[in-house]
Structures are given as C-alpha cells and as structure tokens.
Amino acid sequence: MVIMEITIPNTAVWMILLLPLAAFALVALVTRFSGKPWLSAWLSIGATLAATCLSLWALLSVMSSPHHQIAIAGFDWLVISGSAGIQMGIILDSLTAVMLVVVTIVSLMVQIYSQGYMHGDPGYPRYFAFISLFTASMLGAVLADNLVMLFFFWELVGLCSYLLIGFWFDRPAAANAAKKAFIVTRIGDFGLLAAILLLFSQTNTVDIAQLHNMAIAGTLSGAVLTWAAIGIFVGATGKSAQFPLHVWLPNAMEGPTPVSALIHAATMVAAGIFLVARMFPLFEASPEALTTVSVIGAFTAIFAASIGLVMTDIKRVLAFSTISQLGYMMLGLGVGGVAVGIFHLFTHAFFKALLFLGAGSINHATGTFDMRRMGGLRKLMPWTYATFLIASLSIIGIWPLAGFWSKDEILVSALESQPVLFALAMITVFMTAFYMFRVVFLTFGGKYRGDNRPHESPKVMVIPMVVLAALAIGAGWFNVNGGFASFLGHGESYGFIEGLFGIFTHPLTWASLLMAGMGVLLAYAIYSAGWLSAERIGRLFRPFYRLFFNKYWLDELYIDIILKKIIINGLFARLKLFDTLVIDGLVNGVVRVAMNVVFIGFKSFDTLVIDGLVNGAGVAVSTLGRVLRKVQTGQPQLYGMFIILGILAIGLCLVFAG
Amino acid sequence: MSIGLEHYLVLSVILFSIGLYGALSKRSAVVILMCIELMLNAANIALVAFSRFITPQLLTGQVFSIFNIVVAAAEVTVGLAIIIAIYRRHETIDVSRIDLMKW
Amino acid sequence: MGLEIAFWVLAVIVVAAALAVVVLPNIFRSALALALCFFAVAGIFVTLSADFLAAVQVLIYVGAVAILMILAIMLTREVQRGNLSNRLRMPVFVLVSIFLGLTVFAVLNTPWPVSAEAPQEPTTSALAKILFGQDGLFILVEVAALLLLATIIGAITLVRDK
C-alpha cells in the first residue's frame, strides 16, 4: 500500500529512542526532587507522545519506501583497534516500524492510565522514570542493527522489569517476584549470549544484516547455525515466558497493574517473539530450530491455558493467558513465518493491555483481584465491562474482531505444516474461550459478592481503555486484504471486503468459531446459568484439577528440588566439601609439609645435630670424667705407680729411640 | 774382678727397686716408710759411688749424701708423727683403708 | 782383694735385708731387718772410702730412724696385722721389674768417665772444709738446721693432744 513519498530524517529516528531516554534521565535526576509529581508524569508522557508520533511517521516512511526499508547510518561506540568494536546502529524496516508503533502506543496508553491508578503513590516520579527507561530500552532493542546493541538493550529491558515488578519493594512478595523474573530471564539470556558468541566466533560479525545474508547464502549453515538459532530461541523463551522458563510471569503480577499491562502485553514478552522474528533468516535456514520453536510454542499454549482454567486471581488468569498467547505467537512464527507471528503480537498487544487495564480498573473499584469476591460489576462499571468484553471476544477469536484474524492465520499455517500442533492449538482455542468467559461471568455477572462499594473508574483511566478497545476491534483489519502480511514481506494482497467476508468460505474458520463458541457456552453453563456445578466438575476431574491448580508443580520443581536439593545442597555442598577437603587440604598440607620439613626439619636438625654435638660434648666430658675419676682412688700408691709408669715410658723412649 | 762403678750402681738400683716395690704395694704405712728409707739409702750409695769414681778428690757426692740423710731423718720424724696422728683418728694405718682423697 | 770380698758380702746382706723388709710377715722383724740393712749400707760406704759418712749413717739411720720405726710399730700395734700387700702387687711388681731391667741396662751401657785418681782419706776434714770452711756450703748447714727445727715443731704439733 503505497501512499505518497514520505521520508523521515535520520535524526528523527534516533529521537524515537533518545526522547524517552532523556525523559528518564531528567525525571530521575531533576524532577523527582521537584515536589511536583505531575511534572515527572507529564515529562514522561510527553516524551512518549513525541516518540509515538515519530514512530507513526517512520511507519509511513517505511511503507512508502522501496523494499520497505530505509538505511540509517550508525556510529562507533567502542573502538577496539585491529578487531571488531561495538557499533550503535539502526535498522528501519517493516518489522521495526510495526514494533515501534506497538510499543509507543501501548506505553503511552499505560502512562496516561497510570496517572489515575498510581495517584498518590509515594514513588510516583520513580515510577514514571522507570517506565520511560523501559520504553527507551524496548525501542532500543527494536531499532538495533547488531546483536551486541540488541543484547545491551535486551538486558536493560530485563533490568527495568525487575525495577518495575518490584516497584513496591517493601512487600516481600513483590521483591521476590522481581528477583524471580530477573533470574529466570537471565537463564534464557545465557542462551542468547552463547548464540551471539558462537555466531561471532564463526563469522566474525555481529551485524544482523550480514548474518541474514550469510544464512540465506548458505555460508552460515549446519550445526553452527542450528545451535545459534536454538540459543537465540532460548533467550526468547526466557523473555517471552515459554515453557519451561515461564514461571516468572504469574509472579510478576505483584507489580502495579499498568506495569503488568505494559510488560505483558506490549513490551517485554513481545521482545522474545521480536527476537525470533528479527533473526528469522537463521531459523528459516535451520529446519530443526524452526520445528523446536513451533513445538515449544504449541505446547506452551495448551499448557498455560490448562492452568488458567482454575485460577481464582484475575491477574493470574491473564498471566497464564499471556503465556498461552505467546505460545501461539511462537507457533505462528514456526509454521507461518514472521508475518503470522508478528501479526498476532500486534493484535495481542492491544487486547491484552486492555484486559490488564480493565483488571486494574476492577481492582481500583473493588480493592481485590480475587474473582470470588467480585460479581455483578456489569451494571456498576459499565465502561470497564464493555471494554473488557470487547477484549475478551477479541482474544478468543470472534469475527470480525482483531484476535480472530491473527489467530486464524496461525491456525491456517499450523494445519498446513504441523497437524499435531494444529490439534493442540484448536483445543487451546476452546480452553481460551472457556477461561476468558469464566472471568467475565464471575466478575461481571451475577451479584456482587464483595465488601466494597464499586464504582466506575475516573476518565483518565477509562479513556485509554476505550482507545485500546477500538484498536482491539480494528487492528486485525490491516491484514484483511493481506496488507499487513505483504508489508512484512509475505503473502499476497486482495480486496478488503473480499477478505472480510471471504474468510467464511474456509472450513477452518467455522471450526475455530465453533470451538470458541463451545468454550463460551460451557463457561455460561457453569458460571452464569448454573446448569452445571463447578464443584462437581472439579471433583469429577479431581486429578486434573489438582494438576492445573498447582501449576503442574513446576515452581516446586524448580525451587525445592532443583535449586535447593540438587544445586545448593548437592552441587554447592559438594563443591564446598571439595574446596574444604581438597583445596584447603592441599594448601594446608603444603604449608604443613613446608613447616615440617623446613622449620621442624631445621628445628630437629638443630635439636638433634647441633644440640647433639654440644650436649654430646658435655656428656662425653662428664662420662669421661666419671670414668676417669675412678683413677682417683685416694691411694697415693696408685699415683706412685702411675708415676713410675710414666718414668718408664720416658726411659724406654730415651733408651731405645735415642 | 775389680769392683767398679757399675757394681755399686747396680747394687743401688736393686736396692732402689726393692724399696720401690715395697712402697707401692704395701698396706702398712710404717712399712711404706721403711721402704722409702731403703730408696733413700740406695740413692746415697749411688751418690757416694759416683763421687768416688768420677771425681775422687771432690767430695760433692758425700756432702750431698749428708744432707740427704738429714732430710731423710726429718722426713721420718714427721712421717711417723703423721702416722701416729692417723692411728689415733682411724684406729688403723692400713693405707688402703684411708682414702680421703677419693673422688 | 779384701775390698772385693767385703763388697760382695755386704752387697748380699743389703739386698737380703731389703728383701726381708718387704717379704717378712712380721713387721717387727721387718724393722729389725731394716736396721741390719742400714748397717750393711754403712759397710758399703766404708768400701767407698766414705768413712765419715758411714759413721753418720750408723748414728742417724740405725740409731734414730730404725728406732723410730720400731717405736711406731709398737705404738700402732701393727704387729698383729702382718705385712700385707695391697691389690697393686702384681702390676707394681711387673713395673718395677721392667724398671730394674731398664735401669741396669742403662747403667751398664753408659760409658762412665771413670777417673783413676785415688780417693781422699780421711774425709772428715775435707768435708769440714767444704761445709764450714771459706767459700763453703755453710748456708746449707743453716738451712738444714732450720729444716730440723721445722720438723721438730711439726712433729710435736702433729702428735700433740688437744
């Protein structure tokens, strides 16, 4: 879709990254102490607003440029003479443009919403500083043209998530959740780092464009490529909460709800998907890596959905829903390519952010996240109800909302290439519908079961939700004519109306809608109409219920078994033992030997030999004396005899020797 | 054969040896004293013999002998006084039993 | 001729008496043998033309020393015990024998510068001249007197009852 020629100056593109970064610096160093919290918020929001506009401009420029790519010059950041240094550069292609728009819009909405949600919080300025930094980091990762710069911002994103999840750091649950998030994603980051180093060692470059060319040309291939791709995917697994590194995401709900919206909708979790998409030529060239991506994605989708079925905390349900949808995105990347995966990321960002903001709104009104203490909010919070309902319909894939289009693409691609995974995905559709509408019916239906007096949230919170709702409805229409896909380099384009209604000619559409409908019906039957009892079903499927409720006991596995038993008590204890016994033993042994040999050796030499000589002399003399004094018999006759003896001796000598 | 110097000297030596033997191997203090006298007499004989045969006109040997006799007499006096004193103290003059100089 | 016989007889008596002193078990008889020995020595002196000395020998040795010996024997009641030898008997005997042999050998093998002059006779005035005459050894006489004085005092001191 070519509009007129729009170009964006290079400086403006840099500004997209630098404005939020500058906002962070200013808020953290200056306005934080100004005593006017609103100043910090406005500064941050202003920077993000500017970044949003620039991102849209950039998007338009890219759309109108040949090959949908604009070249932007980078600069050397760290120069190491004689070998590769670290450059900072920008890729501005369709993928970048889409991500820029998503990140900035959602960030903007969240920040505006936060003005209401976080009002009065003592850490208000700090909050906005971190949000700005987070936005800047994400934008930096998206814009990066080489793996080192990407990794740099990747880690920065992780740091910001730690800071924001643990924003209320005096709450132990929040502090632990922040640590858990950081550590688990760090494990994934290790994979990414290994991949970067592997690639660099084999190709001597970290430039993404060059690596793409090498992968396409076949220069980079085989085991190296596969392992590098898998390493990259491991990094993505951590950030995007795929199995088995998903455990941090539910706990991350300890942070403020707008943060959850930002982190779990638009930014951090999307970073993993984005990473795979960015490095996709490497995955395309390695079928094994691609299959791994698909399988893990599909498994995560159904696995997380199953847990979400039984959660009572609304944010937990949304967290597992996020994990599940991310699994969908990975599956999409694996079976369908960049366009399919990123499209779902695009739509998901909007409706998931909306769902979280809705949950925040509910919490603002009822003071709790426990769905058992909610109910009947439909009449009391109409705007929240409406937007939440729209988002729910979108996520479960109801035509013509955004989620339908993106999910459909994934299902189509999965059916073509991986039938087993397709089956899993279809089951997940059913589960998604069920748990989402379970939430809807429990929260908004029936009668209010709590203690508060819930009322609608202030405008500053509602308006962003409405904006996101509009996007949740219409964001999918970008691909109705195949435009989105072709924009990202795949697919063909056809007419809008043709695409809108023509979709019903495919049997798959009907199948997915049927699954979704059944899920809604079941949820209605249990939680709204009361035809079936939740407890009876729970008792019927008791083992499954327990499995899901305990989240497959993975947390226990990770913390109690692996961490505590194996690593700490096992490995570390053994290492400590080794250190104490062997190393210390060796060192002490050497010292002891040295001491014995040298000092005690000398000492014993001194004692035995020297003292021996000295004492021996004394002993010899006294022994000699003891023996010789027997001569002193006291009898002069003996003395006389000796005299004679002496005389004789002299005489003999004289006579015979002359 | 004519009696020459050697005869007297040999006699002197024999007498001296007897006296020496007795002085060193007798237990009685008085006997030891007597043997000492024998030795002194042997010395006198030798002196006088030398004087007679080497320098007959000079009577040096005889003068020496006179004084030797004087000293011998003095020594016997004191020696016997000592013996008597010891006898009073220890009731014995068995020199093998008097070993105050023992270690 | 007569000289030789006299010498041999006297020599035998000297040696025999000396042996008797050492050998006889009765100490009293040893003392008497000693006296006899002194007499024989005096005779030897006569054969050596030392007449004054022979007289002095008899006076002092026989007359005083031997008597003192007998006195001491009486006073200390030695007679009962006998003339015993101590344990050094054998070694001393060996040593003395060697000494004897050696000295006799030395004596017999030394070329003594024997002079053929005749001895002085009588010796008394000659001795008097040597001792008391001009350029004589008078000082020795005085010293001898002192010695005797000291001896007397010493002997008395030693045997004095406290």
Image (cartoon, grey):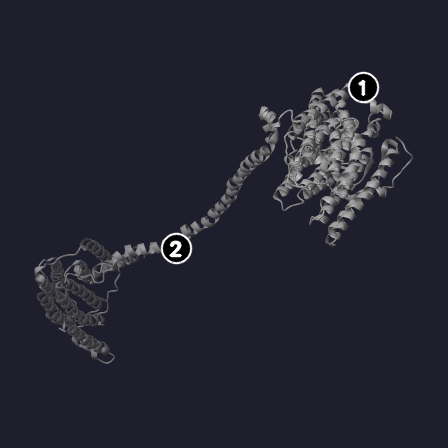
Local secondary structure at mark 1: helix
Q: Position of residue A492 (x, y in %)?
A: 84, 24
How far is the residue under mark 1 from the one under mark 2? Answer: 116 Å
Q: Quadrant of residue C99?
A: bottom left
Local secondary structure at mark 2: helix
Circle 1 Cα neighbour tier, 10 Å, few/some/many (<14 / 14–19 / ≥20): few
Q: Is residue A295 visible?
A: no
Amino acid at dot 2: Val
User: What residue is drawn where x is 68% and y is 27%?
Assistant: A524
Which quadrant would the N terminus of chain A be assigned to in this image?
Answer: top right
Residue holding disc 2: A614
Amino acid at dot 1: Thr
On the same chain: label 1 and label 2? yes
Q: Mark on residue A484?
A: none
Q: Mark on residue A505?
A: 1
Tell me the mark number nearer the camera, choosing from 1 and 2: 1
Q: Position of residue A390 (x, y in %)?
A: 76, 32
For residue A64, above or below residue B41:
above
Marked residue chain, label 2: A
Task: Work out whether mark 1 precedes mark 2 in sequence or the reverse, and give the earlier one.
Answer: 1
